[in-house]
Image (spheres, rainbow, N blue to C red):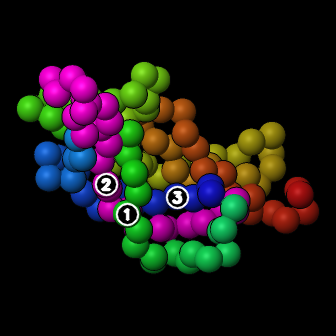
Amino acid sequence: MILKAKIMDDLSKENSVIEMDAQDTDSISSAYSLRNIELLEIYGGDNADQFQPGDKLTIINNAAIHDNNYIHIEGYEKLEKAKLRKQEIKVDSSDISINYIQELSNTVLVEILNSDLL
């Protein structure tokens, strides 16, 4: 599902789930966290019609805290509360508005103001 959501909590020991290996009790077999989000906008995807803005969900996040260590799978992009700034621009004299740009990445949300452009 493609959506915009607000993260309602921080990664912590309390919402982290650590499973130790049954054979080697010093090794972790699985580490993740259960994070709370609020849906802000839903753009589509599988089962998108079952949700609406304002719904609160618990999701599995592929990162955890264990013994004050941050653990994640290889290639994981950290789930964090984004700082957004509003900016409106014109592109090629068209009415296209880039409403929000995430400060720490190149993520943008684009809103078409003129439906004749579609």
**Mark in the foreground, 2 or 3:** 2
Question: Please, is residue 14 above or below residue 77 in the view?
Answer: below
Quarter of image, res 27: top left
Is 32 magenta? The answer is: yes
The crowding category of the residue bearing disc 1, from other C-alpha atoms within 10 Å (few below 14, some 14 to 19, many at least 20), is few
Question: Please, is residue 109 above or below residue 42 in the view?
Answer: above
Q: Which mark is residue 4?
A: 3
Residue at the spot of label 1: 58
> Which range is magenta?
19-45
Residue 63 visible in the displayed image: no
User: Quick one: label 3 or label 1, which is nearer the N terminus?
Assistant: 3
Outermost residue toward the left in this view: 67
Residue 52 visible in the displayed image: yes
Residue in the image at 45% along x and 77% along y: 54
Instruction: Measuring from the top left, give residue 65's x and y in whole percent.
Output: 19, 37
Lateral position of residue 53 relative to residue 103, left or right: right
Instruction: Measuring from the top left, give residue 102's x and y in whole percent.
Output: 46, 42
Amino acid type of disc 2?
Leu
Residue at the spot of label 2: 34
Question: Please, is residue 108 above or below residue 27 in the view?
Answer: below
Lateral position of residue 51 relative to residue 70, left or right: right
